[in-house]
Structure formats: C-alpha cells, structure tokens
Image (cartoon, rainbow, N blue to C red):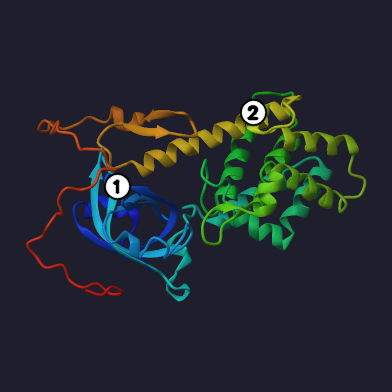
Amino acid sequence: MKEFYICDCARHENKIITSNFIVAGKQIKPKKTGEPYLALTLGDRSGQLEAKMWDNVEEVLNAFEQDDFLKVKGLVNKYKNRFQLTIHKLRKLGETEIEFSDYLPKTARNIDELWQALAAFVASFQNPYLRSLVEAFMSDPEIAAAYRNAPAAKTMHHAYIGGLLDHVVSLFRSCDLVCRNYSQINRDLLLTGAFLHDIGKIHELAYNRSFSYTTRGQLLGHMIIELEMLQAKLALVPGFPPELKTLLEHLIISHHGKYEFGSPKLPMFPEAVLLHYMDDLDSKMEAMRAQFEREADLESPWTSYNASLGRPLLNSAKFLTPKADSAPEDSSSAEDNEAEPESTIESSEETPILPGFKS
C-alpha cells in the first residue's frame, strides 16, 4: 500500500516525496530553449496532481504512456495556492508492483448498505410489472456486480468505484421525497427510470486501471446500450404492457434533457421531466461536494474554475466560518508555472537513497 497519497500534499509541502501514481495525462512541451519537458497529471484514489519534469527528460519520454503506473520522486510545492509536483526521477512500475486499490477512488459509503437500500425501495413498488423488471436486473449476478462497482461517469460526477450505485440511491431518495409533493407523478415509473437511466454505464465505462470508455461505449453510448438491456429483461416479464415499455424507453433517451446534452428526445411527460431535473441536480451537487473536498486546503472560500459547471464555486460553509486574525499575505506572485525553474532547492541534509531508485 502507498504511504503517500495526493490528499497528503499539505503535510508534505516543500518536501521531497517518493510514491506511486497512475498517469492520468501526459504531454510533451517545449522549454524556451526548445528542449522538451514533461507535463503530467498524476492520480491515485485520493485525487489528481499536476506534475512537471524538467531535467533528464529524454531518458524517460518514451518509457511510459497514459494509464501506466509510475514510481516518482519529486518536490511537493504550491503554485497559485494549488499543489504540484516537480519530478526529479521516475520509472514505470511492473505489474507485480501495482496495488490497483491504491489508484481508483471509491465511495466512502458501504456498498452492501446502498444495495439493500435500493432493494427496499424496489420492494415497495405497487406496480408488479415494474417491480419484476427491476428485480430481474438486480438478480442478474453479472449486472449486479457491475452495478455495485461502476462509476457514474468518467470525470463529471460520481467518478469513483461505487459511484453509479451511490448516485442512483441518492436519486431514489430525492425522487421519493419530491413525489410526495406532486400527486400526478407515478412513483414506481419515476424510480424505475432512475434505476435504468445510467445502467448502460456498466458497459460504456472501463474501470480496471483508470476510468475510460470502452469501444462499445464510444461507438454507442450508454443510452443505446440501456435500450438493448431493457429489451432483454422485458422478455423475462410476461405480459409487460407495451405502453409502459414505451414510457421507460422515453425516460432513458430523454434524461439528459436537451439535444445539445445528447438526448435524442426532450422529456415529454411529468416523470421524464422530473427525472431529468433530479438527475441534473444530484450530479451538480456531487460535482460541488467533490471540488470542495479536493480544494479543502485552500484558504480562499472560492474554488478554481469548475469545467463541468462552467464557473468557479463559493464554498459557503468556509465563507461563513469566522477567521482568526492573521498576518498580511505575501503579495508577491509566482512566475508562470510552466516556466523553467531558475534554481534548484537545496537541502542542508543529504537526501537518502530511496527504494527502487539508484543514487
């Protein structure tokens, strides 16, 4: 197991660390001299970290690719209040050195409890056809195992192991509450739509080494995959009403809500409209929570730009927390973080030779 995780950066600021990471992004860029340097995005289960390698780059340029695992030695520092790593040495890890659980983020919630909560909601369905349909999915060992482990997205929201289940249970709870305020809503139909709306992610996304799209996912997308999965399970529920089947298909293909977001149809009945907005709300709330968690060490209540929401975010809890009097901050600014370092930080103590590296 790793001893240093990205979430530990605050405790290791201006210190040299050695740890293992997955390469989430790799770019080769030119220095002012025209020589190459490496700009990497490194990841582990606690988050991601930008990293630069300035020296001896030619030796490692072709030694690894994105989604490979590296052992890295470097200096943890800050630029514009964000941690980054200046890499001194790196090497590609062998397969026997990789502990995959160190790299993929996982829900902090109990998977078994989430699955039981989902089953309890389904057991409360009044419509026997919808209850039998969802139970057919949940009793399929292959689907159940994937549903319990899949992320809900590659990066945008609930992008962690167990994220799909976490997202759907949250949706069930929210939809169940909202149904009580709108008597015209068919609760069983809405919750079935919530169960099915992202189930195709179990085939659209790959999540063994890192989160990425499968070939089938790239070519078809999760909605088409979901329609195929629905058709297969409907064959196991005798007498399933064709009108109900059509409504479920519409819930699936309209849940993104807009053409530009990938829905071939706009939501056209109350449960479809509600599913879209509740799904969108849950996704946005999780995207905010995750960014606040990633940037918890920042002094400012404002986050960096959130690409999925198209804006920086204000952490209202941090904003309302009384602050102790402190000395004025140093107003000096750092140079561009992609500029070459002019000097190397030296330590009065000799850096020990670390396991896996030669002196």
Mark 1 highlights which residue? 31
Identify which residue is drawn at 72% across, 29% down.
271
Q: For mark 1, give the secondary structure.
A: loop
Q: Residue 260, which numbered label?
A: 2
Frontmost of labels 2 and 1 is: 1
The span from disc 2 to disc 1 (Cα, nearest Å) is: 39 Å
Q: Which residue is drawn at 32% across and 41% down?
A: 296
The amino acid sitting under disc 1 is Lys
Q: Quadrant of residue 12?
A: bottom left
Residue 200 seen in render: no
Q: Answer above or below: position of 267 versus 158.
A: above
Identify the residue shown where x is 10% and y is 60%. 347
Horizontally, is 305 left or right of 261 in the view? Answer: left
> Of marks 2 and 1, which one's residue comes earlier in the chain?
1
Up the image or down, 21 lies above or below 221; here it is: below
Residue 308, image x and y in percent?
A: 49, 34
Name the outermost residue toward the left.
348
